[in-house]
Amino acid sequence: MAVEELCALEKCLGLKAGKYSSRAQGDRKIPVLQTNKGPSLVGLATIASHLVTEAKKEELLGASIEEKAIVQQWLEYRITRIDQVSSKEDVRNVLKDLNVYLEDKVYMAGKKITLADIIIYYGLHPIMADLTVQEKETCINVSRWFSHIQHYPGVRQHLPSLVFIKNRIYSNIH
């Protein structure tokens, strides 16, 4: 999955496709990018940060020292928590954490989209796709944030758009 996400990120950033492979690490596959300029880069966060720098879009890494640290924090959260989800209880805990954090925020770090938003979005997409409309309503801040990010130009790529509200069907009865 991480290789597909990195390919989507490349498109989002306007970069040419890189040469990826995967390396087994326990029961997980870790993405590897073979660069032309040196050694291979290993890991989702490392490669994603490298791609942002290659695209000369460093603002996606955060505008201030604090924002840069927050972006890195959320990249780490993605790898250590979201990618490790293995049960409904894990899903509930991750969504609860994010829902509380996003209560008064539009983006994960700062006042505009960052790499953290994009990478968390890609990691949450399969989780959110499995939720019912009612389950999505219980984590309204995550749903609001997710819907906003999925409509951000260039982010969603090949992923299907997810629905967050149930439209009422009105009858002809007056």
Image (cartoon, grey):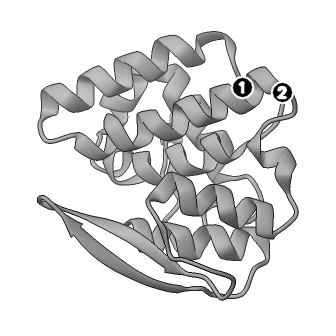
Kindly identify which residue carries mark 1.
Answer: 106
- Kindly check if marks 1 and 2 are in contact, taking CB atoms under 8 A apart as contact: yes
Q: Is residue 126 left or right of residue 171?
A: left
The secondary structure type at the circle numbered 2 is loop
Q: Which residue corresponds to the image point at 51% horizontal and 34% vertical from the top-left?
A: 173
Q: Which residue corresponds to the image point at 69% horizontal and 83% vertical from the top-left?
A: 37
* Amino acid type, label 1: Val
Residue 70 in the image: x percent, y percent?
65, 26
Q: Nearer the viewer, mark 1 or mark 2?
A: 2
CA distance for labels 1 and 2 = 7 Å
Residue 5 in the image: x percent, y percent?
49, 67
Q: Is residue 66 left or right of residue 22?
A: right
Q: Which residue corresponds to the image point at 75% horizontal and 43% vertical from the top-left?
A: 61
- Do we see residue 95 in this rendering? yes
Kindly identify which residue carries mark 2.
Answer: 111
Compared to 123, does 12 lie above or below?
below
**Mark sitting earlier along the chain (1/2):** 1
Disc count in the image?
Answer: 2
Residue 124 in the image: x percent, y percent?
41, 45
